[in-house]
Image: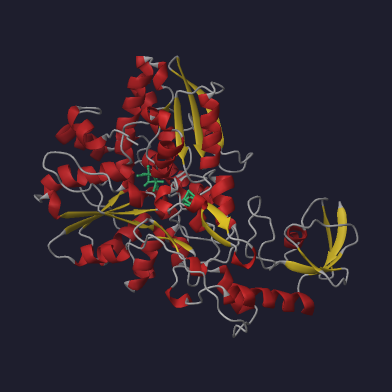
């Protein structure tokens, strides 16, 4: 152990601990902007400087380790003055139009400016204006970039995609899409992780709330809204509600108050995906065509974009089952439209997703019977939902916990855990087990596919199950860097699986790029636990037990993988 003092407090920590972490261990918070544990420890912003042993030179605390006998001051006059100048210089290169920024009131630079009591910026403003395609689901405002490098590191180290890089030299150094490419040509998966890791408002999702408002206010349209599983685990963080105060039924109530005609839970769509995907898996699996192994899940659009650009030869191994969002949209514009006697063209399907890539996934056309535009018309993120609730001046403490609408009301625990890494695999295995054995599995049969983030954090979970004498080898992976590693092993023949679940965002959709942002904090696994808790309390825990799903097959689709199911619920993945 190394002994030192920080702000006069005696501290004892293991060797190789950084000064920042040592301070944190005794409750002393050192301000920072660029630091992200294990991802960005490069001291680019220099906000975390501290004074050591009364020496003239200040050092950065995020990348300097403790030494025996050190005397550290984290908030001396010298430190404060240096920090203030650093932030003033940053502000001179940052658009300070905070009131109209997507990150207003959730911005580390704004907080720091306030904390340091900076009332004016004594340096000349110099803003870097770069062109951007504002139709792309990922928006970058270069005038807000503080060059902290987090986006570069997250996209490179976590997602292995290298979309962002530095260009220029010296004072002209700036962040931009690498290789002089336009963002739409840069193989961006749209995972949105660079957005949730940006400390300021330089990166955001395309704001589609006006489109949603226009639809909600259009009396000639029937507006149906679906809410994804992971949204319920995060929206309350922005609304000041506790977990218990924020059931998904309150989101339904808010949506109805905003003008939605019908509200549905994507959990129903997830159950439908499982019916088709589990059947497809068993069909492929028992056909014994090794070339088709493993079968990959395809509900995560960030992952689908990744495989198209990085591993196109694996495209045919993706399940043809559409995602719950798209399946639900297709059912809304066919089965449901018929039920309520509406022309699908007069239905606007909105979805609320924890995801930015879902905004691109919606481009899929609806081909069934009469051409009916897109299956999903508008996608808003969890963050956009909370902005809409706020702009509608809805008092969330008065919201009621209302059910979703008929006839796609029921959901199951299997559908709700889709939002957490391992959830799709577990849900599919529950139904595959039932199909093979004719009975439901015990509740703890497939717990091994879950990743609660507490183990080694490797992001890859391998398991093997024996279901009625049939051996099924599975892998669950989240994060695209981990995914690349896994796919390379599969490619080299070093890993063999039958079924693989991939989620682009670490921890799954609960950690999605459209979720509420808590700068520098990892929330995915905590939110995942909320979904697993909901699963425990569902009346039905298997998708095939969902009464409304059974009704949909009885009344409309026939059975999983039927011709009609193929037409509505499956797709061919093309480059
Ligand atoms: Fe997801 Fe999915 S789990 S992809 O994260 O399969 O976005 O929540 O809605 O479609 O159900 C997202 C979440 C979501 C779909 C489902
Ligand atoms: Fe990289 Fe994801 Fe950001 Fe695209 S959205 S630039 S893939 S981190």
Residue 478 % position (x, y): 51, 40
> Up-down: is 437 above or below 300?
above
Residue 222 % position (x, y): 16, 57
Residue 52: quarter of image:
bottom right
Residue 410: quarter of image:
top left
Residue 241 % position (x, y): 45, 64
Which residue is at 53% across, 45% downward?
A: 159
Residue lying furthest left: 341
Q: Of residues 458 and 186, which is closer to you in this image?
A: 186
Number of marks: 0
Q: Which of the image's four quarters has the C terminus?
A: top left
Task: Answer left or right for 394 relative to 115.
Answer: left
Display colour scheme: secondary structure
> Up-down: is 466 above or below 320?
above
Which residue is at 10% across, 51% downward?
A: 342
Residue lying furthest right: 69
Residue 314 % position (x, y): 42, 29
> Up-down: is 538 above or below 107?
above
Task: Answer left or right for 305 relative to 36.
Answer: left
Q: Of residues 107 and 136, which is closer to you in this image?
A: 136
Which residue is at 38% across, 16% downward?
A: 289
Q: Of residues 237 and 207, which is closer to you in this image?
A: 207
Task: Answer left or right for 80 relative to 275.
Answer: right
Tell me, yes or no, if residue 523 can be seen here. no
Tell me, yes or no, if residue 62 can be seen here. yes
Q: Of residues 199 and 267, which is closer to you in this image?
A: 199
């Amino acid at each position: 152990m190394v002994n030192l003092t920080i702000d006069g407090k005696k501290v004892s920590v293991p060797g190789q601990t950084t000064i920042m972490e040592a301070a944190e261990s005794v409750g002393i918070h050192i301000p920072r902007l660029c630091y992200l544990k294990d991802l960005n420890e490069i001291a680019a912003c220099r906000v975390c400087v501290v004074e050591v042993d009364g020496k003239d030179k200040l050092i950065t605390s995020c990348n300097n380790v403790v030494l025996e006998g050190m005397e550290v001051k984290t908030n001396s006059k010298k430190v404060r003055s240096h920090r203030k100048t650093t932030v003033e210089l940053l502000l001179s290169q940052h658009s300070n139009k905070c009131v109209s920024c997507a990150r207003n009131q959730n911005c580390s630079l704004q907080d720091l400016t306030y904390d340091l009591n900076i009332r004016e910026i004594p340096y000349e403003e110099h803003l870097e204006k770069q062109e951007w395609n504002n139709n792309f689901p990922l928006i970058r405002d270069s005038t807000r970039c503080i060059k902290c490098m987090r986006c570069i590191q997250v996209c490179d180290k976590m997602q292995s995609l290298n979309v962002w890089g530095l260009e220029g030299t010296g004072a002209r150094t700036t962040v931009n899409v690498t290789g002089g490419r336009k963002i739409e040509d840069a193989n961006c998966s749209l995972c949105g992780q660079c957005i949730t890791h940006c400390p300021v408002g330089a990166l955001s999702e395309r704001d589609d709330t006006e489109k949603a408002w226009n639809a909600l206010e259009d009396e000639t349209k029937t507006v149906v809204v679906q809410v994804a599983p992971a949204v319920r685990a995060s929206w309350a963080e922005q609304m000041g509600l506790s977990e218990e105060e924020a059931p998904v039924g309150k989101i339904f109530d808010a949506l109805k108050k905003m003008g939605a005609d019908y509200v549905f839970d994507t959990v129903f769509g997830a159950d439908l995906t499982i019916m088709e995907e589990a059947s497809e898996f068993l069909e492929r699996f028992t056909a014994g065509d090794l070339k088709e192994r493993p079968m990959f899940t395809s509900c995560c659009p960030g992952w689908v974009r990744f495989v198209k650009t990085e591993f196109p030869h694996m495209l045919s191994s993706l399940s043809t089952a559409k995602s719950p969002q798209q399946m639900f949209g297709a059912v809304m514009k066919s089965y449901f439209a018929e039920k309520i006697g509406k022309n699908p063209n007069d239905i606007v399907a909105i979805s609320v997703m924890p995801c930015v890539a879902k905004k691109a996934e919606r481009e899929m056309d609806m081909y069934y019977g009469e051409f009916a535009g897109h299956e999903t018309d508008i996608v808003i993120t969890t963050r956009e939902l909370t902005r809409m609730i706020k702009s509608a001046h809805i008092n969330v403490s008065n919201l009621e916990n209302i059910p979703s609408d008929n006839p796609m009301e029921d959901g199951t625990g299997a559908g709700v855990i889709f939002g957490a890494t391992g959830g799709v695999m577990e849900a599919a295995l529950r139904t595959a087990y039932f199909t093979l054995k004719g009975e439901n599995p015990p509740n703890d049969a497939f717990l091994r596919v879950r990743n609660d983030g507490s183990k080694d954090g490797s992001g890859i979970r391998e398991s093997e199950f024996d279901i009625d004498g049939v051996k099924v080898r599975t892998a669950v992976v989240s994060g695209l860097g981990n995914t690349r590693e896994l796919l390379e092993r599969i490619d080299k023949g070093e890993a063999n699986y039958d079924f693989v679940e991939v989620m682009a965002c670490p921890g799954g959709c609960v950690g999605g790029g459209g979720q509420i942002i808590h700068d520098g904090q990892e929330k995915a696994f905590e939110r995942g636990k909320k979904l697993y808790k909901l699963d425990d309390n569902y009346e039905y825990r298997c998708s095939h037990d969902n009464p409304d799903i059974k009704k949909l097959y009885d009344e409309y689709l026939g059975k999983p993988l039927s011709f009609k199911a193929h037409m509505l619920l499956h797709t061919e993945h093309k480059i």
